[in-house]
Amino acid sequence: MARKNPTLPAKASARSASEARADLVARAARNAEGATLCRSDPLGDAQAVAAVVRAVESHAAELSRRGLDGAYCEAALQLAREIEHHLQAMPAAAVSARVRSQEAADLLADAAATAQAVRTAVLRVTRSADGRRVARDFGLGDPFSTRQPAHVARALTRILAALEVHREVRDDIGLLPEDVQTMQDLARDLGAIAGAPATVSDEQAQLLEAQGALRAFFDLFAAKASLALAADPDERARVLSLLPRVEERRHQRREPTRASG
């Protein structure tokens, strides 16, 4: 956007790839606390990284001056590898779901339906300026697979805790004492088959964290490239077309569907 000064060298950065990754993860966490959630294909995001990194390298001097250097590229490549690893590991959870007893399966189904009903009701009444924060207190935005006991047990636990803090939401959705008792009973019974939280391998949560961090890298690239290449609209359009498409939805309208398994 500004005229280049040939006497001004690219700003050196001592940031390491691990520091860049930590910054991207932190940005993703802040994004999740905001009013917008992004829906995109994690594999598509991972596969797009190589092309985006090549675009960064082809404009390294200008983008480095604007704060996007090789450390971020290395972190993005690492995140892409992690996403592919988590996608390969997640089917194991679906296999384990098939060996549950019918009693355990019925309990999980009841608990999941109850948790989802409350989450949907909370989503309807948290449309105020601080509604996103309130909704997150109820667990909205957390990974939620109806086939994973650990997810459902965590959802019920967060709902019960948030109900004590946000009494106004409890009144707004019309939750009765017997509804709360039902959730408490389900959470207790489900805990017996969900396992200790510390021992549950939550590939989906790690996948979402890595994908969110990668989307933060794409956002930084798009923002900086838009300015760095303002004088070359054709090249700007080319590099921005490398980014995978993403659908943005306000949380008040619809909660993103979580991948099952």
Image: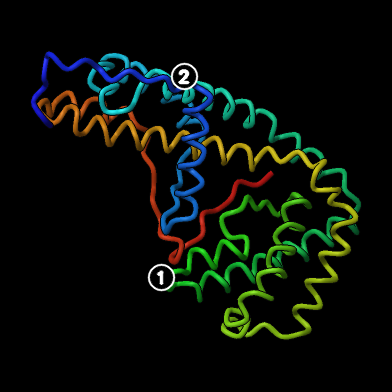
How crowded is the residue under tag 2: few (<14 C-alpha within 10 Å), some, or many (20+)?
some
Q: Is residue 54 above or below residue 158?
A: above
Question: Which residue is at 42% across, 24% downward?
Answer: 72
Mark 2 or mark 1, earlier in chain: 2
**Which residue lies under the disc numbered 2?**
74
Secondary element at tag 2: helix
Q: Position of residue 232 (x, y in %)?
A: 11, 25
Question: Which residue is at 47% across, 25% downward?
Answer: 76
| Disc marking residue 72 | none
CA separation, marks 2 and 1?
37 Å
Secondary element at tag 1: loop
Indicate the amino acid at tag 1: Ala
Q: Quadrant where the N terminus lies? A: top left
Asked where in the image residue 11 lies, by quadrant, the reply is: top left
Q: Position of residue 236 (x, y in %)?
A: 19, 28
Question: Which residue is at 53% across, 22% downward?
Answer: 78
**Which residue lies under the disc numbered 1?**
129
Q: Is residue 177 above or below residue 151?
A: below
Question: Which residue is at 59% across, 50% downward?
Answer: 258
